[in-house]
Image: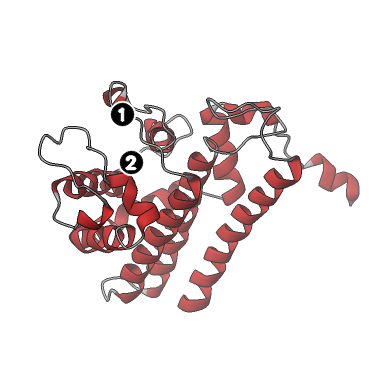
Amino acid sequence: MTEKAQSSMNHISPSSLNNLPDRVRYLKSFLSFTQTDGESIQSSKPLIAPLLPTILDAVYTTLLSYDITAKAFVPRQPGHTGPVPLNAEDLALDHPQILRRKDFLKQYLVRLVSNDDWSDNSGFWTYLDRVGIMHTGQPGFKHRQNRPDLRVEYVHMGLLLGFVEDVVAQSVLETDELDAGTKANVLRAFNKLLWIQNDLFARHYVIDRDSDFAPQGVQVAKAGLTRENTMQFFIVAVLGTFLGIFVSRLFLC
């Protein structure tokens, strides 16, 4: 029995995870993210698209309700030529700078439900990875190379993903347009996808001790992150994924 278990064990080289397609392949395999999951996400577009204004307002109402997240929107946003707020308290949902950020998030959400290439080498994963990079102070995208740095700490990025997942889950659970089985498939697929996105955020903030990979600008030897810290982070991510799958089954059985 032991020999059989060992012969079926997959080998993953730590250094291979520094390569995006190899990392995506591992993430998809571990989470059992399949083409069917991708199709479930695509099938939710008619449901999600009309709800985007409500989702965007909910997200930015929450972001603007905390000074620690709202302060990121005070500096002049790229392309905005009008007056800028003096402080976070001056911001509102209809402020031009917030409208620009809402437009970016709208494009991101539309991209999530519109993708039709879920292969390991798909440009979709490159896009999700660059979204992660651009929030660390690095350009990420070519259009940001000559723009001011955008640095948002990982804790806020993780919370935002959790908030978005909750809003999507509520929308799916409350609709009468989908049967219980379809709801379960959509919720499970979104849960897996957003945890993949979570990893593609985290890899640009967290040091990987197994491969000695560090995000740009971080010195591995000087960072106060131990191998145990990294493993704890990984375990939390895995548990979060399976908890999401369990909850979706619980409510829809």
Quadrant of res 104: top left
Q: What residue would you read off at disc 2?
A: 116
For label 1, the SS is loop
Mark nearer the N terminus (2 vs 1): 2
Apparent side of residue 29 relative to residue 133 in the rendered image (left or right): right
Indicate which label's residue lies in the foreground, 2 or 1. 1
Quadrant of res 97: top left
Image coordinates of residue 61 in percent, x first then y, are 27, 62
Apparent side of residue 38 relative to residue 143 in the rendered image (left or right): right
Toward the viewer: 146 or 28? Answer: 146
Task: Check disc 1: other Cα within 10 Å, few if <14, some if 14-19, many if 20+.
Answer: some
Image coordinates of residue 156 in percent, x first then y, are 44, 52
Task: Give the CA separation, mark 2 to mark 1.
Answer: 33 Å
- Residue appearing at x 64%, y 49% in the figure: 233
- Residue appearing at x 73%, y 34% in the figure: 11
Image coordinates of residue 101 in percent, x first then y, are 24, 45
Note whether residue 225 is visible: yes
Q: What residue would you read off at disc 1?
A: 148
Note whether residue 194 is visible: no
Toward the viewer: 143 or 47? Answer: 143
Residue 179, placed above or below residue 71: below
Image coordinates of residue 251 in percent, x first then y, are 48, 78
- Residue appearing at x 52%, y 29% in the figure: 20
